[in-house]
Image: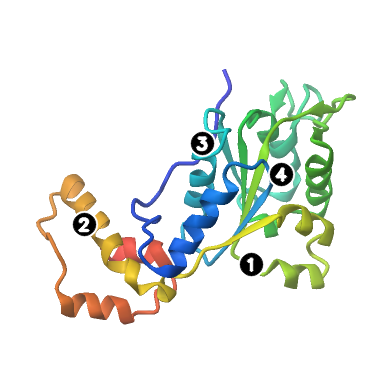
Amino acid sequence: KREHMVVKPRFDGDLVAESPGMKGVMELVSRVAPHATTVLITGESGTGKELFAQAIHATSPRANGPLIALNCAGIPENLLEAELFGYQQGAFTDAKQAKPGRFQMAEGGTLFLDEIGEMSSAAQAKLLRVLEDHMIDPLGDTRSHKVNIRVIAATNEDLLAHIKAGRFRLDLYYRLNVYQLRIPPLHERPDDIEPILRVFLERARQERGCRIKTISPAALAVLQRHDWPGNIRELHNVV
């Protein structure tokens, strides 16, 4: 039985779209979802990039397939390729049995690669081949395997600066950046703060017995003036 690392929403209310900027992003989501092309989601930490990946997958023809996630920054460089491409029994000292990689686990669905800017150069080269040929080479396997997946990548970093510094491949950037979704930070969309707050307060009432039902105009004005460097994640913590 395969274990799927399925992306699940961490914050209800992230996809509230009452501000013009967010309405534009949601319109782009509806336009890119039906296609099989790669998508690059950019935005500051805490803006909910993984939820947009989930929205694209859920409204795409691949919705019945798995949505598999991998945080490229959360896995040591020497293990990243094994996690992505899998390995055969005996491929290395601790490989006591074969293990499928995330590409194989996402067969027929979507692979979400978070923090793509942290991917090693070797893994970048292999990812480029997958995007070009739809073929993977598990470690220790003498055969290549065809995969049918869609890749959505996300980053809070400036990939063009990484390219200039030699830390990210330009050809891979072009392959990933077929469509780009820039998620605006919370301080650019103050109109969304009140509806997001309503969602968070409702959840707090249901889960924690919170008796606060609404927010005063004065308190809302304070929140709308705040810079929110932590974005939705910070707002959730404040609530």
The residue lying toward the viewer, choosing from 28 and 78, is 28
Q: Position of residue 141 (x, y in %)?
A: 85, 25
Tag 1 residue: 157
Q: Position of residue 191 (x, y in %)?
A: 33, 71
Tag 3 residue: 6
Q: Position of residue 3 (x, y in %)?
A: 55, 26
Tag 2 residue: 201
**Mark 4 vs 1: CB contact within 8 A:** no
The reply, left or right, for residue 206 in relation to residue 163 is left
The residue lying toward the viewer, choosing from 167 and 38, is 38
Which of the two labelled residues, at mark 3 and mark 1, occupies the earlier sequence position? 3
Mark 2 and mark 4: Cα distance apart in space: 39 Å
Q: Is residue 46 visible?
A: no
Secondary structure, mark 4, is helix
Q: Please tell me which residue is depicted at 76% across the width and 29% down the height of the picture.
A: 87
Point out the frontmost of discs 2 and 4. Answer: 2
Mark 4 and mark 3: Cα distance apart in space: 18 Å
Mark 2 and mark 3: Cα distance apart in space: 26 Å
Classify 10 Å Cα crowding around label 4: few (below 14), some (14-19), many (20 and above). Answer: many
Which of the two labelled residues, at mark 4 and mark 1, occupies the earlier sequence position? 4
Point out the frontmost of discs 4 and 1. Answer: 1
Q: Residue furthest top?
A: 1
